[in-house]
Image: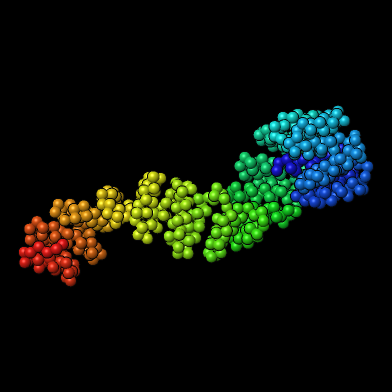
Amino acid sequence: MLLAVGCFVALTTNIAFAQAQEIKEAQHFIEIDQTSKAITTLEKATTTYPADASLWYYLGIAQIKKGQRDLASKSFDKGISLNAKEPLNYVGRGRLSMLENNAQKAQLDFDQALSITKSKNAPVLRAVSEALLIDPKNAAKAVTLLNKAKGVDDHDPYTHVALGDALLVQNNGGGAVSSYERAASLDGKIALPHYKIGLVYLRSRNYPSAQEAFSKAIQIDPNYTLAYKEQGELYYQMKDGPGAAKAYEKYMSMTENPEEGKLRYAFFLFMAKDFQKAGEIFNELVKKPDASITAYRFRAYALVESGKLEEASTAFSDFFAKAKPEEIEAADYTAYGKLLQKQGQDSLALMQFQKSIEKEPKQTELLQMMAESYYKTKKYPEAITAYENLKVIKTKWSSQDLYNVGRSYYFTDNFQKADTTFQKLVEVQPTMIVSHLWLARTKANLDPESTEGTAKPYYEKLIEVASPNQDKNKNELIEAYQYLGYYYFLKNDAANSMTNYKKVLALDPNDVKANEFVKAVQANSKPKK
């Protein structure tokens, strides 16, 4: 990105004014992402000025930018055949060799160009340096050549832009910005240096400075397409979805290749929560034979967010069918699971959540959701597993967690773990009725015949906590008094047994069990528990 625009520069020092103006116009077309117009302008110029071999160099560079390397090669050869002493076409030919990873062949052409000019022609020095930068390892050579170009002409802004590019390849951001600022000071009417400054600041996450630089580029040239594009990226990094979408929409309206930016634009719309519009674009993209897996993924997500659940379900099926296993993320299974939940398919949803956990085990929120879902659907063994996995990463359980997992242990007859869990619940919620109730019940199950009276102090504590509000806690109090009544009955303590059963009847005169035991106590018999 940094080098793409700078590589095509207005090398006008050795050509006539008319050609220079057309070259400058072509350069501007490339800078604003209108390469086809640049090619048209230069093709016309080669006809208008057939003796100017340098025009074929500029045409070839534009064709490279367009991805037409074969045509570029023919353009450079045409320029050389027209005038073998025009150095720029050798640079162009060397540039093609660099793109083909043939540095040795490229150097022969670069040496030829430098030999013709005795390394004293600033535009040629600059052109060679830009071609060398195709391979970042050549940054030092490029800097050397550009310093020579500065020695020849220190007032060409494009030489300073190229030097900034080379310094940036060396990770010398400060030096790069200084070079770009020098270029801007030499010609206040060109947007390129400010755009380049914005890129440096964007890379270093200095967002205010990046925004200032891009805005300056747009102020100088409202048609500076790539500044809008990078503004979109800037707002994206700042997590400003609406800003990113707006800037990218402007870019899309100006570039000659809007199809290339559609995926990014749709993603920004999604970020801006314009799910309807984003979904429409994703729908277009997945119809293409080379559609990316990202388009399939976010098409499904956008449909979910738009409330189109049936379409979203189909879209997820398409995504999973298209994606390779390594391309599926844990979040994809989670999103599909949540969709299935919305459709009332809880069991299938849990299967997707489990796949997500297998991809990424330490998902606190998802494990919490799974544990609660298993508990609510009374799948207690699965709930226990989910809660135990959750405990590994969630160091402090909530009261609700303790309650749910304690009951899950209880209903799977794991009373020892239920006991430990409910004791912790009582510690954190000493005034909560259900904490004492379930601890007492667990203790009762650890002493199923009630011969040891293990649950007695716990039911007594339950009565102490629940008594202030007898109407609200009626059922819990009845259960506690029934336990105590039976306990004392087994101990042949008729008085205490009768006292507790009468307390049950005071709360519910029609309680069948209490009436039976009262009769049994009075008859001094031992009924079944």
Q: Residue at x 91, y 48 (%)?
A: 47
Q: Residue at x 30, y 53 (%)?
A: 409
Specify whether residue 212 is in view: yes
The outermost residue toward the bottom is: 510
Looking at the rendered structure, the number of numbered marks drawn on it comes to 0
Q: In which quadrant is the N terminus drawn?
A: top right
Residue 199, position in %: x, y?
A: 67, 42
In the foreground, 193 or 294:
294
Q: Quadrant of residue 290?
A: bottom right
Question: Is residue 412 left or right of 334 when viewed as pictured?
Answer: left
Q: Residue at x 24, y 57 (%)?
A: 437
Q: Residue at x 45, y 47 (%)?
A: 361
In the foreground, 9 or 157:
9
Question: Is residue 98 left or right of 451 when viewed as pictured?
Answer: right
The outermost residue toward the right is: 51
Question: Is residue 427 left or right of 5 when viewed as pictured?
Answer: left
Residue 114, position in %: x, y?
A: 84, 30
Residue 41, position in %: x, y?
A: 85, 50
Q: In which quadrant is the C terminus drawn?
A: bottom left
